[in-house]
Amino acid sequence: MTDGGIASIARRRDSREDVYLAAAAERTLRDAENVAEAILRAGGEAISADPDDLPPRIADRYLELKAAGRL
């Protein structure tokens, strides 16, 4: 699950606190990318979306895989 606010936090640099928050946000984004890459290397598929979009994306992907005979 992703949080759209993380990307905007990662771009802020107006104050010292913003710089620390931006560094933490960048780390969060990098960690998410690393996890997705590990899932792909293990033969899986990584799906990421915001909380409202994630359940339908998972369901759609499940139906696609089922229709393709990949389950």
Image (tube, rainbow, N blue to C red):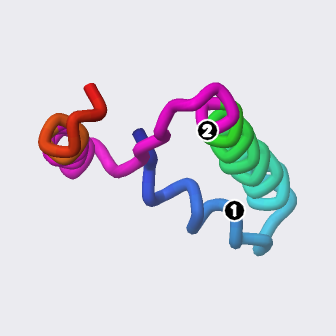
Q: In the image, residue 48 lies at what x, y percent?
A: 42, 46
Going 47% across and 39% down the picture, which residue do you hit?
Answer: 45
Secondary structure, mark 2, is: helix
- Disc 1 residue type (three-letter): Ala
Q: Is disc 2 surrounded by few (<14), some (14 to 19) or many (20+) residues within 10 Å? A: few
Residue 66 lies in quadrant: top left
Is 46 colored magenta in this rendering? yes
Q: Is the N terminus in the top left, top right, bottom left or bottom right quadrant?
A: top left
Residue 63 lies left or right of residue 46; in this view the side is left
Q: How many marks?
A: 2
Q: Is disc 1 surrounded by few (<14), some (14 to 19) or many (20+) residues within 10 Å? A: many
Which is closer to the viewer, label 1 or label 2? 2
1 and 2 marks in contact (CB < 8 Å) = no
Pick whichever, 41 or 37, lies toward us: 41
Q: Which residues are magenta?
A: 39-62
Q: In the image, residue 26 lies at what x, y percent?
A: 75, 53
Give the residue at mark 1: 10
Going 86% across and 59% down the picture, which residue do you hit?
Answer: 16
Give the residue at mark 2: 40
Residue 1: which numbered mark, if any?
A: none
- Disc 2 residue type (three-letter): Leu
Secondary structure, mark 1, is: helix
Pick whichever, 31 or 8, lies toward us: 31
Going 48% across and 58% down the picture, which residue do you hit?
Answer: 5
Q: In the image, residue 36 lies at what x, y percent?
A: 61, 40
Going 61% across and 38% down the picture, which residue do you hit?
Answer: 40
Give the spatial CA distance, label 1 vs label 2.
25 Å
Residue 24 lies in quadrant: top right
Q: Residue furthest front?
A: 69
Residue 26 lies left or right of residue 49; in this view the side is right
In the displayed structure, 64 sits above or below 40; it is below
Sequence-wise, which precedes: disc 1 or disc 2?
1
